[in-house]
Amino acid sequence: METAYSQNSSIKTHSLSNLWRTAERGGYPAALWRLPKSSEKQLIIDLSGEDRRLRIDLEELPAGFAISPFLNPESDQTRFLRADLYFSFNAEEQLISEETASHADFWRIQAFEDDAEEDAEDAVPYSPSAPHHGPATADEREKFEEAVRHAVAEMKMGAFQKVVLSRRKWVELPKRFDHVAAFNRLCDAYPHAFVSLVSLPESGSVWLGATPELLVSQDLQGTFRTMSLAATQSATGTDGHAIPLEEARWSHKEIEEQALVSRYVIECFKKIRLREYLESGPRTVRAGNLLHLRTDFKVDTQAVGFPQLATVMLDLLHPTSAVCGTPKSSALRFLEHYEAYDRSYYSGYLGPVNINQETHLFVNLRTMQIEDDEATLFAGAGITEDSVAENEWMETEMKCQTLLSALSLS
Ligand SMILES: C=C(O[C@@H]1C=C(C(=O)O)C=C[C@H]1O)C(=O)O
């Protein structure tokens, strides 16, 4: 479904930071994002006051932004932010376009405008004092490595083939950490990532991330895309120089780990008897301080007469073998027992839905949850029977560095 918009000139004068601050202070859910290889920054604000959890049906939903938790077994727990207000900015943060959904409540728009007016006069400068973060305790590291060893032992007995184990890392943020400034720094540091900032007042948290992994997208031409992304190594060699992509070498374990994800994607296509997909890769790609192996999949949904493909594939794909494991049910059981914490939105998916008639949903990786002055970072590593526990821990440390170094928090 398309959302009807009308122009509204009175909100125009506010800056991106001002709009964001008004949304956060006023408790309006909001999402700000920048698509890979684009310079456009897009912002939506939900004025409805409703905490919508639903199943994504791209044919039905109005324009908005979706964020799904990792655990979403019936696919009906996806948090949906409606785009009552939509703003788009260029790289210099000049407003390119600004729209108000026709269903948005007039009085709520007025109230938001009044708040924005007040906030503009009350801007608080960013104070970049040093952050604190303790090193991970030996206990956390031991617990993670122990879980890896259990996984390896179970896989050697044939219980499953792959499981993605994750952990958290806590960082104290500088006082008055400026969320939009941090978002902008991630945009500059990672031009190929999907960078996003999502404010969820109902949980008192803000999610900030720069993910390299697309889950599903459907563009204006009807092209559906997904990818299999797995296997990780540092993008810099021991001499400190960037490794040229064509010189990256991958072990048998890493090639197999990524192949499992590709097979999983192909199995999903098989379930719906779709053979007309184009597959390219695997190839080495850079994601900030890391290299991964990636295979791209593409379908012309118009040519195959399957306009609802993205909706169907979203249900089938999530959670993929890149964030959960193979087979899915055994991996989930293992995670429940050995990971034993709530991943919340980490390794779920997020992105714009039906914005300018396009949908781009990404896997929520290289991400942190901000609550007041504390950030929780999340990182996982794909474990196969050839995994070495210490190396997997180091991999999660490197994944945390993607955000920490770009935000000068390490
Ligand atoms: C699970 C994460 O990343 C995923 C796991 C990877 C791996 O196991 O090598 C690589 C890329 C992602 O698909 C993460 O970043 O937290």
Image: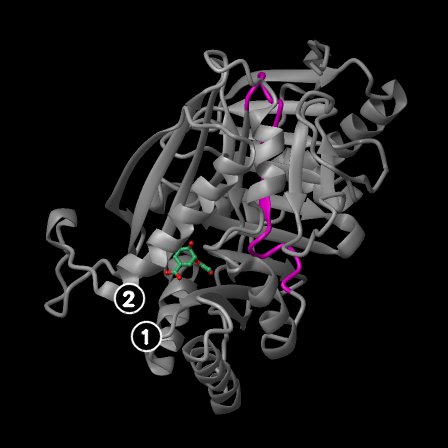
Magenta stretch: residue 62 in it? no
Q: What is the span of residues highlighted in magenta in the rendered image?
A: 343-358
Magenta stretch: residue 354 in it? yes
Quadrant including the C terminus? bottom left
Residue 249: percent from left, percent from top = 15, 59
Determine whether 390 is above or below 187 in the image. Answer: below
Numbered label tally? 2
- In this rendering, position of residue 141 left or right of residue 389: right
Dot 1 or dot 2, earlier in sequence: 2
Determine whether 380 is above or below 25 in the image. Answer: below
**Could one spot residue 375 in this view of the protein?**
no
Whereabouts is ligand 1, in terms of quadrant?
Answer: bottom left
Q: Nearer the viewer, residue 273 or 397?
A: 273
Query: Which quarter of the picture shows residue 161?
Result: bottom left
The yes-or-no answer for disc 1 within 8 Å of ligand 1 is no
| Disc 1 residue crowd, few under 14, some 14–19, many 20+, Cα 10 Å | few
Q: Residue at x 74, y 22 (%)?
A: 60
- Per the image, label 1 sits on a secondary structure element best described as loop
Q: Tag on residue 253?
A: 2
Q: Nearer the viewer, residue 55 or 171?
A: 55
- In this rendering, position of residue 72 left or right of residue 27: left
Labels 1 & 2 near each other (Cβ < 8 A): yes
| Magenta stretch: helix, strand or loop mostly | loop
Q: Nearer the viewer, residue 54 or 177?
A: 54
Q: Residue at x 34, y 54 (%)?
A: 258
Amino acid of disc 2: Lys
Query: Which quarter of the picture shows residue 395?
Result: bottom left
Quadrant including the N terminus? top right
Q: Which residue is disc 1 drawn over? A: 386
